[in-house]
Image (cartoon, rainbow, N blue to C red):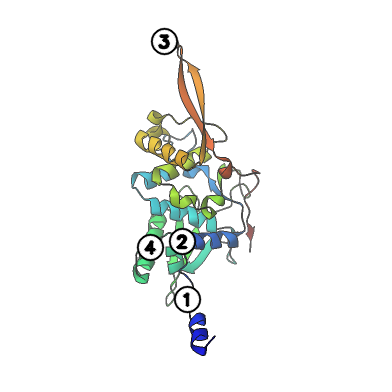
Amino acid sequence: MTKQTRQTSFSKRPAPVTGGQTRSALLTRAKRAAVPLRKVFVQLPQSAETRPGLLAPFITAGDLRGLRAYLMVVAASSATNEQGTWTTELDSLVWARLFDAHKDAEHAAARTAAWRTLTRLQDKGLIKCSRTKGSRNIAVTLLREDGSKQPYTRPGAADKDAYLQLPIGFWTKGYDEKVNLPGLAMLLAICNERSWAAFPAEWMPTWYGWSADTTLRGLKNLREHGLIEQRERFKKAALTAPGSTLFYEYRPARLLRPAVQARPVGATA
């Protein structure tokens, strides 16, 4: 091997890091099997006057990037920092890759897109974000999932708030990149239930805050990627010719069902 050849081989740059690789690296660092999310984000309790949670505005606004970003922030927040807050600080370009805001964008545009995405989440009361003068880092502090702007606490550890869990395989296996916005809405709704559940399209605007069409398109998207299981059920309908009507129930596919419904992983620093 000549001197020129050796220099050339050592000067090669690695392939660009993808959004998926960045998310996998962050989740590996977080050391958790599943990501906890309070159910109030998806749907308010039955005692509430209206049932839709803060998930609904993402769906009606068509904000897939914002929703994916929020779930990624929750996934990243596996432990508190020295100040006792659930804060993750990363370079703004890393945030951009986590949100896939770097695709077909110059670095400056990607950084701006990441900041704008995070400020949308801040406007909803879900996070606090800040930039240190002279630094390109963005510090993101997780707040409670109900938009109250109260400090975040780990569900199941600090209180008895009901929560769902998304196994990290949803991200590490790349399903987060395949699921569209209706699919992600319905995935969270289905994971929000304890077991098999029906989702009558006509009731979805009242229950969750999105349309019947969004419901049907979301279920179709999830079936295409094998992320849900479906079963037939019948109920009596005495005034119909067959005497019963068919409906469907759904639950997450095995990949998305945590093996053990234990407390979410996380510890104070």
- CB within 8 Å, label 2 to label 4: yes
Residue labelled with disc 1: 13
Q: Return the x and y of residue 8 as percentages of the image width and height.
A: 48, 83
- Say which quarter of the image contains residue 104: bottom left
Residue labelled with disc 2: 19
Mark 1 or 2: the one toward you: 1
The mark nearer the N terminus, 3 or 4, is 4
Q: Look at the numbered disc 3 and give the secondary structure of its residue.
A: loop
Q: Return the x and y of residue 31 as percentages of the image width and height.
A: 62, 58
Using the rendered image of the protein, determine whether residue 231 is visible from the camera's viewpoint. Answer: yes
In space, the residues marked 1 and 2 are separated at their CA atoms by 18 Å
- CB within 8 Å, label 3 to label 4: no
Residue labelled with disc 3: 241
In space, the residues marked 3 and 1 are separated at their CA atoms by 70 Å
Q: Look at the numbered disc 1 and give the secondary structure of its residue.
A: loop
In space, the residues marked 3 and 4 are separated at their CA atoms by 55 Å
Label 4 amino acid? Lys
